[in-house]
Image (cartoon, grey):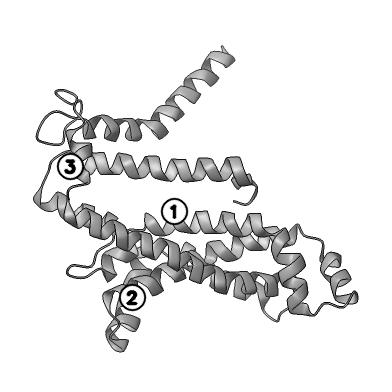
Amino acid sequence: MARTTNWVVLGLTLTFLIGPFIIIIFAGASAGESLAFPPAGLSLKWYAKVFTVESFRQSFMLSMFLAVFGTLAALLIGVPAAYALNRYKLPGDETIRTIVAAPIIVPGIIVGLALLRYLVVPLDFTVTMALFFAHTALVLPYAVRVVSSSLHNLRADMEEAAVLLGCSRLQAFTKVVLPNIRGGVLAAFILGFVTSFNQVPVSLFLSGPGVRTLPIDMLAYMEITYDPSVAALSALLAFMSLAIVFAAERLLGFSRYV
């Protein structure tokens, strides 16, 4: 009886988690002209149409730019910050960790509104600059936390041995510390990339005319067109995210860092 109950609970959990994914796959493969599930028939024409919509192509390139370069900028800040928090006893270090984690804790709508009111409007940032700054700030906590986890598992005496053998602190960091935490840095990049690419609440506040990330462009597209192409694009993005995470798990052991 207990075993049957466990299988039922497992099946319901998987249905809850995978169900929406299956729905968008088949809704995007509908042969009809409107978004519906179950579809009246099956066709790949909406998956093909995704690549012909100009706004999707432009917003995809912007999302890729923000995800790649925003994450790299976050790592440039986050790796030294994680190193300082792990290797030195700083006054108020727990408070610093809480502040760094604030973009994760605070709802995205509040973060977006605050950035719009106190950064974009007073400083007259362009839409692209505002989005880049916001995505970097949102990814930064993940960079610090994941890299901190790698540094925590790295023996500090390895670095001290390099210093005793004649390396400067910078040389010890670049030749000993960084090569040993490269898995964590790559894991932080992948996590930041996926988080930035799929970001909605903050991007919703900071997007402007003609400059929108892909998720925001999809929302705008659905306001005027209710065809299955949005479901097809959603399925493609879900496959892309799954492929990235799966590859990271196979190559890096992604689950060890997050």
x 24%, y 60%: residue? 58
Compare marks 1 and 3 and give the one earlier in the sequence: 3
> Callout 3 environment at 10 Å: few (<14), some (14 to 19), or many (20+)?
some
Q: Position of residue 162 (x, y in %)?
A: 85, 71
Q: Secondary structure at mark 2?
A: helix
Question: Label for residue 91?
Answer: none
Can the viewer see residue 247? yes
Where does residue 163 sit, x and y in percent of width and height? Answer: 85, 76
Q: Amino acid at mark 3?
A: Lys
Q: Residue 23: x percent and y percent? A: 28, 31
Task: Name the residue beneath numbered marker 1.
Answer: 194
Which residue is at a point 31% across and 39% down the rendered structure image? Answer: 235
Q: Report the residue marked by disc 2.
A: 130
Identified at 17% across, 34% down, the residue is 45
Q: Quadrant of residue 242?
A: top left
Query: Mark 3 and mark 1 in contact (Cβ < 8 Å)?
Result: no
Closer to the camera in the image, 144 or 52 = 52
Query: Quick check: 105 above or below 88?
Result: above
Q: How far, Cα to Cα, is label 1 from label 3?
A: 24 Å
CB contact under 8 Å: marks 2 and 3: no
Mark closest to the chain's N terminus, 2 or 3 = 3
Residue 49: mark: 3
Q: Label 3's element?
A: helix
Q: Residue at x 32, y 58 (%)?
A: 200
